[in-house]
Image (spheres, grey):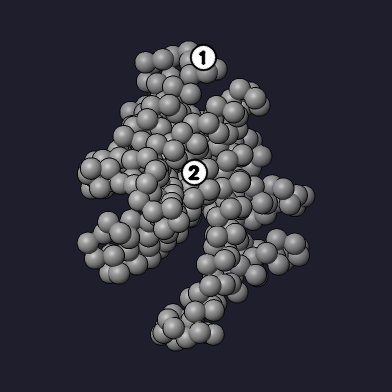
Amino acid sequence: MGAYILFGVVTSSAAGVFGTAFLQESGVWPHPARWSPFVPVAVALLAALALSMSPAKRGPRVLLTVEIATLALILLVSTVVLVRLISGDAPDGHRFTLRISQVEPGTDWSALFLGTVFGFLSFAGFEAAATLGEEATEPRRDIPRAILGTAIFGGLYFVYVTAVEVMGFGADGAGLRTFAASPSLLGDLGRSYLGVWAGNAITLGTTVSAFGCCLASVVGASRVMYALFRDGLGDRGPGRVSAIGTPGASATLVAGAMGLVILVCATVFAAQPMDTFVWSGTMGTLILLVAYALTTVGGIWLIFVRRVMPVAAWEVVIPLGALAILGYTLFRSVVPYPAAGAARWFPVVAGA
């Protein structure tokens, strides 16, 4: 629940950053003030609260349509960028390179773990479908499919798009500095490689996508809070559902907690949404790692010790293979790479 609350802060902050960038780039708000990103942040939280209190199917249907359109546009732009990189027709002389997956000499551990936070944030939420287990028609069939499908698609999608983004800006120092300073990575690439319309469309779509992730975080946290209170204190307070069968009290508390974190960061620490994004993302990732570790230990206990959850032998190969790749990647992040060859870049790509 803590991880989902912090990820709600992360994604609403992202909606504020992308939303402000869209308003600025489209000329609607050409000179936004320093406080401007907090306006779309507040809109995202209030809209997520309203949709999380409505029947479960209503909000996701609208968001799914927008998400599919946005994903299609992002993949289209990424493919165009990749083709121009390979053909040598990219702006500023950028070209296709595998250097993007090489850890630069002198990179310290703080930078490495900050990149790891981004990686976990990209995948975080694949398990969120489980929070709707009591509302799904066929939970034992649909939820495992949703979790596995999200993990597979998310893995392929984020590795591909992130690699193209880095190459599109340039894998050298100047390109990475531009990459880090960009308020909308694919939006800027769309404007450079396709045209202004593509950049604005992607920035708007990314704003809606960030809002969708915020909604998922509110829904997930509110369902977990509802279950905890219901099982512990009974059918009252946050453990009570509304007349339409949604945990409205829990959703209100969750959205309020997200808003409180953002308010404290903005007033006490004078943080902008991007700062709040990084801080909350790091804390949420650490909490999620603890949850994943405990879940893994529990799974091992139930499957191999108690033997109450029979699992086909071939299914064990996947996590063992992933652990082997992870261990080798961490080893190669410390031990120097060979001078040249595929071994120089393969471990990081495989680890990603």
Cα distance in 3D space between marks 2 and 1: 27 Å
- The amino acid type found where label 2 is placed reads Ile
Q: Position of residue 89 (x, y in %)?
A: 45, 41
Residue sitting nearer the eye, 259 or 243: 243
- Going from N to C along the chain, the mark reached first, 2 or 1, is 2
Q: Residue at x 39, y 53 (%)?
A: 234
Q: Amino acid at mark 1?
A: Ala
Question: 50 or 211: which is nearer to us?
Answer: 50
As drawn, is 244 to the left or to the right of 84? left
Which disc, if any, is residue 5? 2
Using the rendered image of the protein, determine whether residue 123 is visible from the camera's viewpoint: yes
Q: Is residue 142 above or below residue 222?
A: below
Q: Which circle, 2 or 1, is nearer the viewer?
A: 2
Q: Quadrant of residue 40?
A: top left
Is disc 1 surrounded by few (<14), some (14 to 19) or many (20+) residues within 10 Å? few
Crowding at dot 2, Cα within 10 Å, few <14 / some 14-19 / many 20+, comes out as many
Classify residue 249 by image quadrant.
top left
Residue 27 position (above or below residue 193): above
Residue appearing at x 63%, y 42% in the figure:
172
Image spot of residue 174 (x, y percent): 64, 35
**Residue 202 shows in the view:** no
Task: Check disc 1 and report its element: helix, strand or loop.
Answer: loop
Q: Is residue 231 above or below residue 195?
A: below
Q: Nearer the viewer, residue 180 or 65?
A: 65
Task: Name the residue beneath numbered marker 1.
Answer: 33
